[in-house]
Amino acid sequence: MKRIQVVLLFLLVAFTLAAPAQERLRLATTTSTENSGLLTVLNPPFEKQYGIKVDVIAVGTGKALRLARNGDVDMVLVHAPEAELKFVNEGYGIDRQPVMHNDFVLLGPPSDPAGVRQADVPSTAMEKIAGSTAGFISRGDDSGTHKKELALWAAAGIEPGGGWYLAAGQGMGAALKISDDKQAYTLADRGTYLAYKDKIDLVVVFQGAEELFNPYHIILVNPGKHPHVKHERAQHYSDFIRSDKGQAIIGGFRVSEEQLFHPDAVQHGE
Amino acid sequence: MDYFLQAFQQAFALIFSLDGEVYAVAWTSVRISLTAVFFAALIGVPLGLLVSFKRFTGKAFLRQILNTLMALPTVVVGLLLYGLLTRQGPMGDWGILYTPVAIIIGQCVLILPIIWNLSISAADSADPRLAATCRALGASEFQQGLVFLKEVRFALMAALVTGFGRAIGEVGIAMMLGGNIEGFTRTMTTAIALETMKGEFEFALALGMLLLLVAFLVNALLQYAQRLDQ
């Protein structure tokens, strides 16, 4: 008889699984927007206004676009312009719109053994790092940051490789920790760097160049390719984060009293 | 040592803060893994008894396959099921990718070989006279199964507990098929992975301790049920 009680317990658990029906919307985005905490302040007002719950799937830009291509999400918020344009040109994405930007920074040991601080343009900075004894840690994970890094090497005419170049194959946080352990140079988005600032010794050795600009776009999955996507809800979300209200939230978001993201939609006009 | 001290402090703080979010994540983990165990047992235990009762060619090979599948990497299960559940896949229309149901299916696949295999061993471990008696009394296979279910229930429970342990501690499937969506498919393990990625190592370790505590409570509950049974 007691056995029946155990079975009942299992059944009870099984039936509690019935999830409450709610309108949902799926956003694939990069770890940088999610981990910084921006979406936890940006999404609730939207969810309240429209009664739609936003399911955030935070992955690298490469994987986010892949999920969108397969129709597993309704929209993406990513930062890899070239891959984004390819995604749109192939017909998977529509209505690509600028939302905000932040920037990348080159980090290195405080002693700056490669002398990157003296560089005035990114290509010089990359040249100094290439072949330096300190070395460089690459994300190596097809993320937006990784793509940006490869573009910087290409612009400097350098083919990265050899003993000084290590591909971590991990997220930004892990890559920062590895760089810090090895006292090597690395490229990071400012948001993640600020979040880690107190935990690592690395300092900014190069910043501010236009080439390090990191724009985020929202792209809706083409309902022509994937009829099941919640296009209308995705459109509401896109409109919301680019509205005055959404842009004000983005511009007002602070981490350690520093502004992380600069709104791009309002100044470009609706 | 600060590292461990901080982790311990945070673990205590987590448990006693009654933070709804943390409890919701723990509950998500428990209910997903228990449900996975339930369905894996529903399939695996009868299959295990059946394999134990029958003599057939290829039985040793089947055991070998099951032994191998017990080493199935979680990410591989995730990748296989992603291929089936994605909108482009054969079961894409179900729309269950990135829901708790997808994780349950994944964990079920993961632990089915374990429960199946250990159920065979459990039934094999019964007194050999039991099967002979059943047959002599003219019991059908189903009736024999019921007798064994009662007779080797403790060994079967051990199979379920092992399966539960594997399910609640895995991260690959929950991440790949659940997507770590806050308040929906975030489990204890994906939360740990996330906090680790964010560099919140102490908090991640604290969550790990909470996971062990939750697993301990569930196992204690099962043992209690077993004791009532004795």
Image (tube, coloured by chain):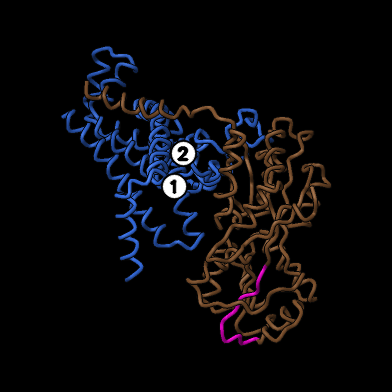
Chain colours: A brown, B blue
Q: Amino acid at mark 2?
A: Gln
Relative height, residue A62 to residue B30 (above, below): below
Residue beneath label 1, please? B170
In-image side of A8 versus B72 (left or right): left
Residue B84 visible to an observer of this rendering = no
Residue A209 visible to an observer of this rendering = yes
In-image side of B27 versus A81 (left or right): left
- Dot 2: chain letter: B
Give residue A74's position: percent from left, percent from top: 68, 39
Question: Residue most toward the top?
Answer: B138
Q: Nearer the viewer, residue A36 or B29?
A: A36
Relative height, residue B70 to residue A171 (above, below): above
Quarter of the rendering containing residue A130 = bottom right
On residue B149, the disc is none
- Residue at the spot x=79%, y=57% of the render? A82
Residue beneath label 2, please? B107
Q: Nearer the viewer, residue B5 or B96?
A: B5
Asked if the stretch drawn in magenta spans residue A108, the answer is: yes
| Element on which disc 2 rests | helix
